[in-house]
Amino acid sequence: MSEDGKSGSKATRPKLGRGLAALLGDDGDAMDVGVEEVSARLARAIPIAALRPGAGQPRRHFDEDALDSLAQSIRERGMLQPIIARRVDGAPGQYEIVAGERRWRAAQRAGLAEAPVILREMTDRDALEIALVENVQREDLNPVEEAGGYQNLIDTFEYTQDDLAKAVGKSRPHVANMLRLLKLPEKTQARLASGELSAGHARALLMASDPERLADIVKARGLNVRQTERLVQEGGMPAVAKPPPAPKDPNVRALERELTEALGLSVNLAATGKKGGKLTLAYTDLDQLDLLVQRLTGRPQRPGAGVEDDPLALVES
């Protein structure tokens, strides 16, 4: 490890984004054999008590039922996949877990005194990358944890989003979209982390002026992502039934029909005040529009157009 723990030769850094086998050996053999065979060749038994979680572990939530299930499997079959760890500077006999904290926790529940561990020399930067890659590949992280892991690498080692996407084997848009989730209020992030909201819900709520209030509405009404998007577009107001319009005066309707029959165009009359109103004429094609303009402006009729082509001519016939 370098003295500052932040730099390392590109030639010696683990190849990320290629799965656990790429972390188990540098000679390429790990890509051609099974994980169990590599484990038997490279792993050593280390006391459970000598291991501790990595400082850069992005995962914060461990499902208790899943841990119990894994512990039972370890009791019956042993730990089939090793933990990846590195030595702790200044603490002989102590090791920091880089990948496999969930297995370590389950091994404690299973009562194991030792666990198979592969020790690697790596920088702080490599350790953060590997811890994040392992969890992302296994889909063990909730969206908030994944986004937090990305932000940690950016803040600590000044990653660009492009570099980060390459390091973890994801697309740049994916990384950018995940990082945006950290802009949500803490309460909304907590709902996303717990599974009350999906990442799709969260991305929709990012566009809202009050995400927390809308998250309450989404939860209470059980809205899906599309419905949440519409809710945001409507300004955050839950859709409510609009009152039916007041019935139009019979005399106004009669006048509308009279004008429609005379002009051959759809006519709508609407009051806009105590005395004023609005007259709307609807046309179905450009020819009707042209004929309407002729009547309103007094422009001569187009050559070749007969009375039968002009619905407005019926007014004069």
Image (cartoon, rainbow, N blue to C red):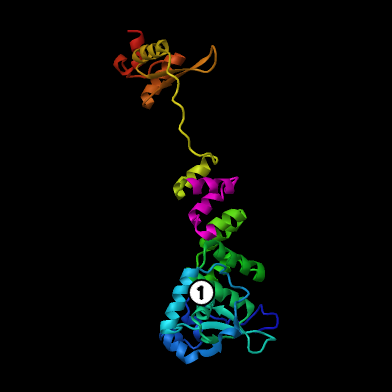
Identify the residue position indicated by label 1 in the image. Answer: 134
Q: Describe residue 254's horizontal placement relative to residue 176 as left or right.
A: left
Q: Is residue 161 above or below residue 75?
A: above
- SS for callout 1: helix
79 or 169: which is nearer to us?
79
> Residue 64 or 234: which is nearer the viewer?
64
Q: Main secondary structure of the magenta part?
A: helix
Question: Can residue 229 be found in the magenta stretch?
Answer: no
- In reply to whether residue 209 is colored magenta, the answer given is yes
| Outermost residue, left side | 308
Which amino acid, by three-letter code, is at mark 1?
Glu
- Identify which residue is drawn at 57% across, 58% down: 190
In percent of width and height, residue 149 lies at: 58, 67
Q: Does residue 75 appear left or right of residue 98 in this picture?
A: left
Task: State whether residue 69 is above or below residue 116.
Answer: above
Residue 11 seen from this side: no
Residue under the image location 52 percent in, 73 percent down:
133
Which residue occupies the foreground of this view, 131 or 4?
131
Give neighbour class at mark 1: few <14, some 14-19, many 20+ (Cα, 10 Å): many
Residue 177: image location, x then y, percent: 54, 58
Q: Quadrant of the C terminus?
A: top left
Q: Residue at x 54, y 41 (%)?
A: 236
Q: Which residues are magenta?
A: 192-220
Q: Tell me residue 112's x, y (percent).
A: 51, 85
Q: Which quadrant of the structure image shows residue 289?
A: top left
How far across and how far down the image is residue 24, in percent? 50, 84
Residue 113 visible in the shown view: yes
Query: Quadrant location of residue 49?
Result: bottom right
